[in-house]
């Protein structure tokens, strides 16, 4: 037999087979690299959120709103979402509504949205804070976007969005972490809205089944200082088309 062939126990390949096998190996490596590049391009950006441990704990003073979730409104017009350590929210006495308070903890930040992981003793009432601007109704809207937990979206986890994060987000929301509605298109100049129920309270439990999915929701939107609050009707939820 004059044709070369591979022998598994031989120490070397026949010379005529070396070039084809070397070329096949290069082709296989190039294909794997191209497939990896394609898959990475199709993966959603995990976002630019940061958990700012290196900056240490900060103490902030402002005015509190307690519904649908506790928020600290700072004198310069910024707002800070509040969560506890781990997958927990912050307990806020309803008597703190519209009053001054201080909070101490580690900050999270994604773009212009800030959140604090509040340390004990939590929100502490104080006197002398500036009054909170009155809530401004912006009407009823149907908005397409995604329900996220505010802590992970702000940088506690990456990615903090999408179906891969759905179970983690639900645990955070059940624990009281404030939910955000991340809109596909800006509304009144903002794409991030604090999400609550139609009656002004926390997220309705039926909406937990829709976390991490593209959905449309209908409800009233209010501006509270620098924050938009979306009070959504859970009966209105529907799957939304991709943007």
Image: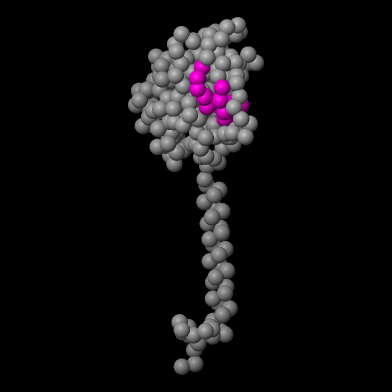
Taken as a whole, is the magenta stretch helix, strand or loop?
strand
Q: Position of residue 143 (x, y in %)?
A: 47, 25
In the picture, measured across the screen, residue 55 lies left or right of residue 205, that is right
In the displayed image of the protein, which residue is found farthest to the right? 76
In the picture, measured across the screen, residue 138 lies left or right of residue 205, that is right
Q: Position of residue 54 (x, y in %)?
A: 62, 34
Residue 181 visible? The answer is no
Between residues 198 and 238, which one lies in front from this camera angle?
Answer: 198
151 over 45 or under it: above or below: above
Residue 23 visible? The answer is yes
Q: Residue at x 57, y 74 (%)?
A: 22
Q: Position of residue 210 (x, y in %)?
A: 39, 32
115 over 13 or under it: above or below: above
In the rendered image, residue 226 lying in the magenta stretch gets the answer: no
Q: Residue at x 45, y 24 (%)?
A: 89
In the rendered image, residue 122 lying in the magenta stretch gets the answer: yes
Q: Which residues are magenta?
A: 104-123
């Amino acid at each position: 037999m004059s044709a070369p062939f591979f022998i598994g126990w031989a120490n070397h390949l026949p010379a005529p087979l070396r070039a084809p096998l070397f070329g096949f190996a290069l082709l296989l490596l190039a294909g794997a690299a191209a497939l990896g590049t394609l898959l990475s391009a199709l993966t959603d950006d995990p976002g630019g959120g940061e958990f700012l441990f290196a900056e240490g704990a900060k103490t902030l003073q402002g005015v509190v709103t307690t519904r649908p979730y506790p928020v600290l409104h700072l004198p310069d017009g910024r707002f800070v979402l509040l969560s506890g350590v781990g997958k927990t929210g912050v307990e806020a006495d309803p008597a703190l509504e519209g009053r001054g308070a201080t909070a101490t903890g580690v900050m999270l930040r994604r773009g212009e949205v800030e959140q604090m992981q509040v340390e004990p003793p939590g929100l502490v009432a104080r006197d002398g804070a500036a009054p909170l601007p009155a809530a401004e109704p912006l009407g009823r809207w149907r908005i397409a976007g995604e329900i996220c937990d505010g802590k992970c979206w702000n940088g506690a986890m990456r990615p903090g969005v999408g179906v891969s994060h759905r179970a983690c987000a639900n645990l955070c929301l059940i624990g009281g972490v404030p939910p955000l509605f991340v809109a596909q298109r800006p509304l009144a100049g903002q794409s991030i809205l604090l999400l609550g129920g139609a009656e002004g309270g926390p997220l309705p439990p039926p909406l937990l089944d829709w976390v991490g999915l593209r959905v449309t929701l209908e409800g009233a939107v209010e501006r509270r200082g620098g924050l938009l609050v979306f009070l959504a009707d859970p009966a209105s939820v529907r799957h939304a088309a991709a943007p």
